[in-house]
Image (cartoon, coloured by chain):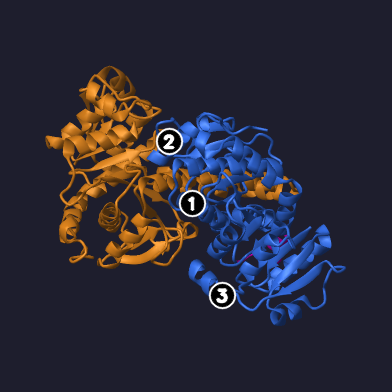
Chain colours: A blue, B orange
Amino acid sequence: MNVAVDAMGGDHAPDWVVQGAVDAAAELGVRVILVGDQKRVAPVLNGRHAGGRVSIHHCEEVVGMDESPLKALRKKRDASIRAAFHLVKSGRADAVVSAGNSGATLAAGVMILGRMQGVERPAIAGILPAERGPVVLIDVGANVDCRPSHLFQFGVMANAFAASCLGISNPTVGLLSIGEEAGKGNEQVRLAHEFFSKSDLNFVGNVEGRDILSGRARILVCDGFVGNVILKLTEGMASVMAQLIERELMGSFLGRAALLLGRNAMHNFIRRLDYEEYGGAPLLGINGVGMICHGGSPPKAIKNAIHMAVQYVNNRVLEKMTFQLTASGPSQKLDSPALSH
Amino acid sequence: MNVAVDAMGGDHAPDWVVQGAVDAAAELGVRVILVGDQKRVAPVLNGRHAGGRVSIHHCEEVVGMDESPLKALRKKRDASIRAAFHLVKSGRADAVVSAGNSGATLAAGVMILGRMQGVERPAIAGILPAERGPVVLIDVGANVDCRPSHLFQFGVMANAFAASCLGISNPTVGLLSIGEEAGKGNEQVRLAHEFFSKSDLNFVGNVEGRDILSGRARILVCDGFVGNVILKLTEGMASVMAQLIERELMGSFLGRAALLLGRNAMHNFIRRLDYEEYGGAPLLGINGVGMICHGGSPPKAIKNAIHMAVQYVNNRVLEKMTFQLTASGPSQKLDSPALSH
């Protein structure tokens, strides 16, 4: 197994990315190809090849975090994110992991590997740590406007991913809306509800905001605008909450004592609700495996994203997804619903 | 000042509603008209008229929490929420407060009092307790699909409300989106950005999910689908967070000691982040004052919503809103922007 890691992508690249990659190679036994500028990556790597499992694939350019994805990809033919996906295309790598410009990762993945059959729009699946285990939120930013069929395909793809990579058997699927009854929501949601109702997915109907973190549905389907807002809101939430609780505790003597005793547990809590645990958001619907990491990802998040990429490949998620998508292909979606497994 | 309270609306009506109304009359000196079935309201009121400030306006019917708003309003001509708004229409009351079917409250308010001049779509403003004080989120459910001009008018209305009722002078206004740059978001957001940029509002640009609770903008504008999901997500969040922290603390001896000492502060924290503090979500853009409360509102939330209605009337929010809307009327929006105050 070879994972191509965009060594130049991220707010702390190449340092933190290289560190995470080295840790993954050492701890998971996976081979990692660091894709980036040899002159900048080699000094950071500093000979730590984890028994020959870490190598460098040189390329000259990088797409900056704030660059327009499409323009940058057109101009920079030797950008690290392009090179990484080309390694997958040519069979030299099995997956891509990047903490760089997420729009560029999405665009390069779709452009170089292509869309899976039966998928109109690839999507990004965010993983939220929630009350009863992780919840998959799809889409979290690839598509700001979605047709009902797109939303349905998101659900089918996330279903295969959650079952295979998160170990959730026959995951509950919910459609994010503003009322639990079938008729509630905007037009896309109302129509998507019909698609889901007629499928063999474990569909629990509409799910409201209050139930996002309760785990009523382990997969939550929404357009990329709503999903992105929710993902970013919940990402910062744990630390905001902890700050507010801390402030409240500081206001009394007993509270200050409690804070002293409970500080470790509090920090564990923040860490647990942090995006680092799952490391990356899988890009679903392309002919290959791509993990999009937060720009500020520390080494641990990079390592965990590589771990998830390995599981994605090992568990043959792409094959399972293709099977389910074909069974529920666009032309016959309402007649032959997605097969559950 | 007379506030018409829908005594029949809410999960715990009339009991909790009547209690909250009596408390408001006693503590705030406001006159409250309990609108509802005399046979059910009088026994709960049990003679507590707070020095003659609490009275009953009898009506026979009520719109159920799960009824279709428009159908129910058409059929039930003597529904309490209709009667309440008619009291405002005829000048016998200055404001309406209801914890009943929120769709019916919205529809009755618009139908009976009409839209303000310059407002294409009335909207509901949710109030989120956040890091640096309350944040106004508009719209939280009245309009699932919005045109750019609607979003702009939401901002103008919330501006007048936040300045007058929450004491936030020259509030910062942000447009909820999925990237901070002006070009990011869906089409409505991109076009609305132009409206706001050319106005005299204290516009801070696009605001991402991570900054919803940080207070970067004190007013956040979005469509009612996104706003409703966020409002409901954050409503339940404090208690979910507290549960998770509690579980984390229970896992160690020091943690259990901390929990024992800090339990009070923790409960204060949950209470502070609860919807009860502001009690109601104002319905902006109708020719009158209406407060929509959570169906499960306890007496304190009802009392606080009545308090906010009083401030709304006393601070002449409607006049200020009319002035700002006229100055930025739809026909000339891009040329004559909203006046700041």
Q: Amino acid at mark 1?
A: Gly
Please count the marks in the image: 3
User: In front of the other: label 2 or label 3?
Assistant: 3
Q: Residue A154 at x, y = what percent?
A: 55, 44
* Residue visible at 34% across and 44% down in the picture: B281
B172 left or right of A21 in image: left
Of pointers 3 and 1, the one earlier in the residue sequence: 3
3 and 1 marks on the same chain? yes
Q: Residue A24 at x, y = what percent?
A: 78, 62
User: In front of the other: label 1 or label 2?
Assistant: 2
Q: Secondary structure at mark 3?
A: loop
Q: Secondary structure at mark 2?
A: helix
A84 left or right of B116 in image: right
Q: Which residue is mark 1?
A: A224
Q: Residue A163 at x, y = what percent?
A: 68, 40
Q: Residues within 10 Å of mark 2 (few under 14, many from 20)?
A: some
Q: Amino acid at mark 2?
A: Leu
- Which span of residues is magenta-colored? A296-303
- Residue B15 colored magenta? no
Quadrant, the C terminus of chain A? top right
Q: Is residue A165 visible?
A: yes
User: In front of the other: label 3 or label 1?
Assistant: 3
Give the quadrant of residue B38.
Answer: top left
Q: Which residue is mark 3?
A: A76
**Chain of residue at mark 1:** A
